[in-house]
Amino acid sequence: MIAVLRLVIKEPTGLFGLVLVTFIVCSALFAAVLAPYDPVALNITDRLQSPSLSHLLGTDQLGRDLFSRVLYGGQVALGVALTAIGIALVCGIVLGMLAGFGPKWLDKAILLFFDTIRSFPTVMFALATVALVGPSLQTVIAVIIVTTIPTYGRVVRTQTLSIKSNEFIKAEQVMGAKTARILIMHILPNIFGPLMILASMDIPTVIALEAGLSFLGMGVKPPTPSWGSILNDGFSLIRVTPWPIIAGSIPLILITLGFTYLGESLRDFVDPKLRKNF
Amino acid sequence: MTALLRLKNVRVQFPVKSTMRSLFDRTSPASFDAVCDASFSLQAGQTLALVGESGAGKSTLALAITGLQRIAEGSIQFEGQEVSRMQTSELRDYRRAIGYMWQNAIGSLSPRMTVRSLITEPAKIHNVAELDQREMSSKLLDLVGLAEEFGDRYPHQLSGGQARRVGVARALALSPRLVVADEPTAGLDVSVQGEILNLLNQLQDELQISMLVITHNLNVVRHTSDKIAIMYLGRIVEQGDTAEIFARPRHPYTLALLSASPSPDPDMQVDRIELQGEIPSPINRPRGCEFHTRCPFAKDTCAQIPPPFEAVAENHALSCHFPR
Amino acid sequence: MTEPLLAIRDLSVDYRIERGRLQALRHVNIDVPKGSIVGVVGESGCGKSTLISSIIRLLPHNASISNGQINFEGANLLDLSENEMRSIRGRRISVVYQDPMTSLNPVLSIEQQMRHIQYRDTTRRSAKLEKSLAMLESVGIADSRKRITQFPHEYSGGMLQRVSIAMALQAKPSLLIADEPTTALDATLEVQIIHLLKDIQAQFGCTILFISHHLGVIAELCDYVVVMYAGEVVEKGTVRDVFHRPAHPYTTKLLQCDPAGIQIKTRILPVIPGEIPDLVNLSGGCIFRSRCHLAESACETEIPPRREVAPGHAANCHRLPI
């Protein structure tokens, strides 16, 4: 793990990504300490202010402090992304390894399931679900989990298939190892690296999806702060003031950049040609 | 005395992989024989070598012996017990009794495990807790002549010869009764080949293990094995005591293999038997004697009638109409 | 004596790696006389592949030639421009690689691949095809008109190695480098390829630099042999001299180790104990001393000079008489 960090830091983009991600994660974690105001407290007298020392990013149409809302919005965004991707990853690993290592009929069944889900466009699927169940944080998370499982599942399946054909797996079988042991001790460690990279590069996509749904009013319910709903408010106020839009988009841009750079430098690490130098 | 391992008329079939064939050509067979009518027995404490070129079915046969490859016909008995009829738990016990050395020494070691955990892996699989793992790995490293510090290395940090030694250590971890060594010297330099063969010889003398050695190089088994079975196209064509085979090889294919390995003497005039053509596909086996397409001594009979596998001496049998 | 076709003089090649400078080749001298077959024999890590890559100047980018000349047909290949070098590769010098399954393009038919390498010729397509067919016939591929339309996976290993030899010879090169061309093949096919190379040499009169770790193959095929160890030439001479009267302890031991040479059954086979030294931090002295049973004090400090033991037979060892 330390070796990974050292390599990531070696590259300027990797270091930049790591710093950005740490910065955003910390600011979301310590939102309660850092935020100068309650993110949902109304203060109509101070509405639609431009940035100043008392309101770093200004206020919105209800006088809520945008800086505090952005910090708390980070909690929502990261919370949604990490839970959703975490659960999707676990499901994807289980299904993918079963498909790759199990009997052929199971492989076909799981692939059919993956393809069925992937044949829906993600946003349409999300909109349809929200229309059926109603908007909420849980709905967003559920939609993201269902739509990203096939991505991870397919990667895991292909990796499992290619690792399965290696002699060290046959060696385990001839030694009498149980399938569960082979999967957990020998296949999982070898596919985990690429998966983590994929996941870290998916985090900004998921955050953008959550923001997009909230922007459309189909994600997080007001008054919970979310970057998407800040953007949504700003959109209707764009002729009055640009600050809500700016406040909502800055963290989105930063987090996308951060995770993308971090993911890319991690991917370089997994590249065996680069890893050889260790 | 019952044999440790007894094979009788073993046949292994593989499906012919081609959608085109199944769609358009229903006359050609759906499967082919990778191993055909293989019979031999291995006594406890002995070494038997399976020799043949690529496609001869040696490795397939070895996997069939471990139970990993299903057999279509015949029987494989280990200490009198039929391998194909073993239940899951019996199969696990059986696999505990065999140590397998893989052809690809580095590739058969799980890449993210240290040597120490690799060689104690069999013990972990079979929940053998009688020995302290560290003590066990040190003992094994010492047994195969590797320094203690190798225990903390990863497979990619090993040379070919060292990886072989780790493979030997892992195969011997649970004191097996049978060791299968698939091409134990493949990919090794000449100067290191001897080290591995010496190690195998020494371990066998000390531990009295039975061994099945698979190789394409007759020179490798001359010094290690008691018996030799020569395979061609999935069939054993000649079988006998090593000394007998080297002294009086009778099958033309054995002769060709023996003379194919040039000796490092530029003045040596070899009376070489050079084979024409290539090994035929096991999907379309030649009629009659399957070797007749490449045999320099083939006569008309050979293309018509398959030769029987017959004993020519007490410990020597072969299938050829016109043995040398 | 006439000028050799290929004369490698004092060639040293380094690789820059993280730990420092890996001296893969050090002061290598090899002569390849015109019309001869010269074998280079050595075990893994001896620098065979670096040698080939240096001759055709396709070294990886972290390698640098620190010293020496490679004289070929009157020019030093190391002085040529990239363009000039390209016109030599494939036309004056061609290479047959170890594994024909990976050295040929799997998605093109043999016909296409053989046509593509004739791109410099201005002849018509049909003439190129005829030429390809003639080449295939000469390497012993029967029914060439049908076989040429097939793809690499439809050939067996031995046949495919014949095809790659045909392709290497198509431009009538004056030097053919064969990089372990029989290693990936079965023993009975190996013999066939050796005979093919011998026939070709007689038929086309080309010069062959044959790289192998297999002593028996070198003995059978080559006129001269160069023994390499850990990036140095330790012995060279005619095959007869070197194999009958090896002068360097490494050659002697290597010949003893060859299982094909041991006819009497023994439980303990000869080996060369120890491992190849680390080429990153070389300390001077004889490169073989750590594994040599004859090493003495001079071997620790001084690099042994080349000594002639007979006309045309030389070895680098302190123990040889001056």
Image (spheres, coloured by chain):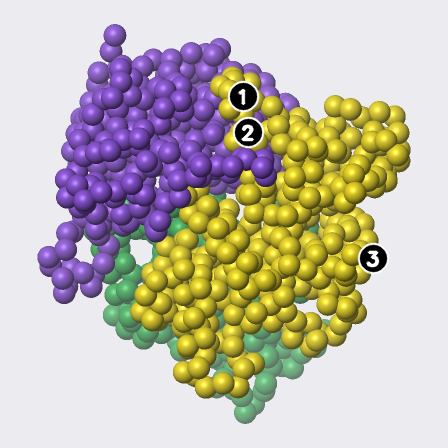
Chain colours: A green, B purple, C yellow
Looking at the picture, how far across and down is residue A111, in whole percent? 27, 58
Find the distance from the CA under tag 2 to the CA under tag 3. 38 Å
Looking at the picture, how far across and down is residue A276, in whole percent? 62, 49
Which tag, 2 or 3, sits closer to the chain's start? 3
- Mark 2, chain letter? C
In the picture shown, does residue B177 fall above or below C209? above
Q: Which residue is mark 1?
A: B198
Find the distance from the CA under tag 2 to the CA under tag 1. 16 Å
Q: Residue at x 74, y 27 (%)?
A: C292
**From where the camera sits, is residue C38 visible?**
yes
> In this figure, what is the number of numbered marks?
3
Foreground pick, A126 / C178: C178
Number of other residues with Cα within 10 Å of mark 1, as a class: few under 14, some 14 to 19, many 20 or more: many
Looking at the picture, how far across and down is residue B177, in whole percent? 37, 16
- As drawn, the label of residue C261 is 2
Find the distance from the CA under tag 3 to the CA under tag 1. 42 Å
Q: Secondary structure at mark 1?
A: helix
Q: Nearer the viewer, mark 2 or mark 3?
A: 2
Which residue type carries mark 3?
A: Asn
Foreground pick, C130 / C214: C130
Which residue type carries mark 1?
A: Asn
Looking at the picture, how far across and down is residue B313, in whole percent? 27, 18
Q: Report whether A238 appears left or right of C236.
A: left
Which residue type carries mark 2?
A: Gly
Q: Residue at x 52, y 70 (%)?
A: C170
For the C terminus of chain C, give its image quadrant: top right
**From where the camera sits, is residue A156 visible?**
no
Residue at the outermost top position: B1
